[in-house]
Image (cartoon, rainbow, N blue to C red):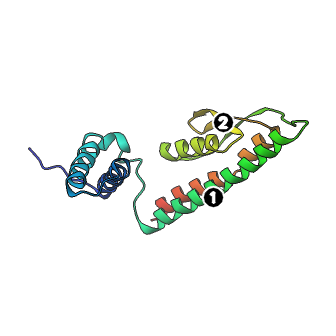
Amino acid sequence: MRARQYDLTFWVFVIIFWFFWIIITGSLHYQSLLLGAAMAFLVAWMNDELLFRKDERSRLDLKTVGLYLRYVFHLVKAILQANIQVAVLVLNPRIPISPGMIHFTKPLKKDLNRVILANSISLTPGTLTILAEGDKYSVHALTRQNAEDVVEWKLADELAGIEQAQEEA
């Protein structure tokens, strides 16, 4: 029987699961920490191929982490802006809601980045990804303008930039 090799992504997930254990238990007692570490390893080991397929994983280098952190920062900014826009729409006495649906394509190569884009759109208040199939997306929005803005969304370009940076390295 051959020994199993664990890559950096595996150990990052073990650490993430272990921190999650610490947060939900709220205990820093050594027995709880040891049990949490064992459980984190067990969960990561049992789900190693389910977490991310090896061909879908992004390399964990400093540049990639920085690009994803920048993406998260811009996503949080977009969510906050959308919250304000939705609040203005709802608080307006005339409620100028004009629901719209738009279909568009964004050429992303990795399924993981396609899912990140679809979920990012749905996380943004006032928009909902109805369909994400390959490069094709269908998005419903509270206003037609918001639906059209999704097509020109800079976050999709950032994900494409992350993919391009991965290919160049």
Q: Is 156 positioned to the left or the right of 140 in the image?
A: left
Q: Amino acid at mark 1?
A: His
The x, y position of residue 31, in whole percent, is 19, 53
- What residue is disc 1 on? 74
Residue holding disc 2: 128
Q: Of the residues shown, which amino acid type is indicated by label 2?
A: Leu
Determine the residue located farthest toward the left in the rendered image. Answer: 1
How crowded is the residue under tag 1: few (<14 C-alpha within 10 Å), some, or many (20+)? some
Q: 113 or 144, which is in the foreground? A: 144
Vertical comparison of 168 with 114: above or below: below
Callout 1–callout 2 Cβ contact below 8 Å: no
Q: CA distance from mark 1 to mark 2?
A: 18 Å
Element under label 1?
helix
Residue found at x 24% / y 57%: 29
First in sequence: mark 1 or mark 2? 1
| Image x and y of residue 43, in percent | 28, 43
Q: Is residue 99 visible?
A: yes
Give the quadrant of the C terminus. Answer: bottom left
Q: In the image shown, does 40 or 133 lie closer to the viewer?
A: 40
